[in-house]
Image (cartoon, rainbow, N blue to C red):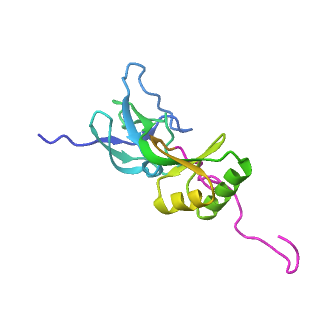
Amino acid sequence: MFTPPLQLEVRCDAPGQGQEPDEDLLPLSMPLSAQERTSLRGRRRTSCGRELLLQLPRGPALEPGERLMPADGSVLVVVEPAPEPVLVVRSPDPLVLLQAAYHLGNRHVSLELRPGELRLLEDGVLEELLRQRGLVIEHRLVPFLPEPGAYATTSHSHSHSHNHVSGQPR
């Protein structure tokens, strides 16, 4: 027997949504990778295997702990970070670690920043580059929570027009 996917349309934690879940609802967990948390539309599954269809309004990426519901408020689903294969990068020299962050940022690599370490999704080419720079690499299967970046929210007001006078420093 075919059961249609549960359609999630409401972000309970978003300002202006105005709908609070019933306190008696037992939440379902929806583990998502960092990449999956950036897409607000598409098919997903709960940790118990229930099929879901995200149909959320435009907005920022989903955050771990965020609560979602169908329009009728019948079910509560909580976003959880799924474990992913990551490289944990460390160095006894803070400057070497900072330089690694700079070079990875120049390549637009998503990074999770933690005291004394960097985390990035596994990538053999980047791993070799980091090892050549003398960094210590560890492979782990853990949730990946990258920095959202400078323009992650939809409400930023950065102007992309710049007026530089020739010959003056930028």
Viewer-side residue, 27 vs 144: 144
On screen, residue 47 versus residue 137, left or right, reads left
Total labels drawn: 0
Counting from the top left corner in percent of width and height, residue 67 is at: 45, 34
| Residue 109 figure quarter | bottom right
Counting from the top left corner in percent of width and height, residue 162 is at: 76, 71
Residue positioned most to the left = 1
The magenta segment is 145-170
Vertical placement of 44 versus 13: above or below? below
| Residue 132 figure quarter | bottom right
Viewer-side residue, 100 vs 68: 100
Please, what is the dominant secondary structure of the magenta stretch?
Answer: loop
Quick one: quadrant of the N terminus?
top left
Residue positioned most to the right = 168
Please name the residue shown 27% across and 37% down the image: 50
On screen, residue 23 versus residue 93, left or right, reads left
Vertical placement of 166 versus 36: above or below? below
Please name the residue shown 61% across and 52% down the image: 135
Please name the residue shown 70% across and 67% down the image: 160
Decide whether residue 22 is among the magenta residues: no
Counting from the top left corner in percent of width and height, residue 136 is at: 58, 49
Viewer-side residue, 62 vs 157: 62
Residue positioned most to the top = 24
On screen, residue 99 versus residue 58, left or right, reads right
Decide whether residue 148 is among the magenta residues: yes
Quick one: quadrant of the C terminus?
bottom right
